[in-house]
Every structure is written in structure tokens, then in C-alpha cells.
Amino acid sequence: MAPPKPLITRSDAVMSGAVVFAGTRVPVQTLLDYLEEGDTLDSFLKDFPTVRREHAVAVLELAKDSVLALFKPTP
């Protein structure tokens, strides 16, 4: 199953304006915190079952692409 579009959302009415996985109340920052602490993606998904693997991977790819775009050489 394809991840939702958009992948992430932000609303002052949801989790005090935190950026969340679209269709959930799970902040993207929580996934990053898990990974930073050395936890696995599987551990995060087990603790937050409203986030599907495909969705989490797509958000991580978006983050990677965003970082790489910052350092893309200009012609």
C-alpha cells in the first residue's frame, strides 16, 4: 500500500502544531528521537501502530532528499 499524500501535516489543533505523520497524531520528531537513541524502525512501529512501515520509510526518504538538496552543487 502506498503512503498517504501528503506524507506529513501540521495543524495548531493537532499535537500543539507538531509536524505529524499524515492521518495520525504521531510526531515525526518521535521517529527521529527513536533512531537517534539507537532504537530500530521496527521498535518505533511496534510502539506506534498507526504509522505504517511504508509511511515511515517515505518520511525518512523525504528527510534525506531535503538534506541532500541543501548541498546540491549549483552549476
Image (cartoon, rainbow, N blue to C red):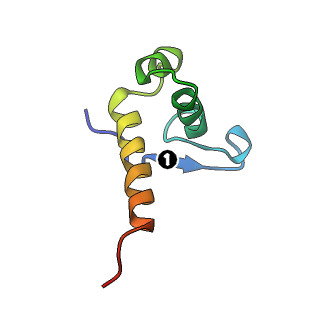
Q: Which residue position is annotated with label 1? A: 8
Question: Could you tell me the amino acid type at mark 1?
Answer: Ile
Rendered position, 17 above or below 15: below
Q: Is residue 23 above or below residue 51?
A: below
As drawn, 1 above or below 20: above
Residue positioned 36% across, 70% down in the render: 72
The image quarter in which residue 73 lies: bottom left
Say left or right for 9 vs 55: right
For the C terminus, the image quarter is: bottom left
Q: Residue at x 36, y 27 (%)?
A: 53
Badge 1 element = strand
Give left or right: position of 54 versus 35: left
Res 6 seen here: no
Camera-nearest residue between 19 and 43: 43
Q: Quadrant of residue 16?
A: top right
Question: The N terminus is located in which quarter?
Answer: top left
Q: Residue furthest bottom?
A: 75
For residue 58, say whether it is visible: yes
Provide residue 2's location: percent of width, then percent of height: 27, 38
* Percent x, y of residue 59: 42, 43
In the displayed structure, does residue 57 sit left or right of residue 43?
A: left
Q: Return the x and y of residue 39 as percentages of the image width and height.
A: 51, 21
- Residue 32 position within the rendered picture, expressed as x and y whole percent measured from the top left: 54, 36
Q: Residue at x 39, y 65 (%)?
A: 69
**How packed is label 1: few (under 14 Cα within 10 Å), some, or many (20 or more)?**
some
The single residue placed furthest to the left in the displayed view is 1
| The quarter of the displayed image where residue 41 is located | top left
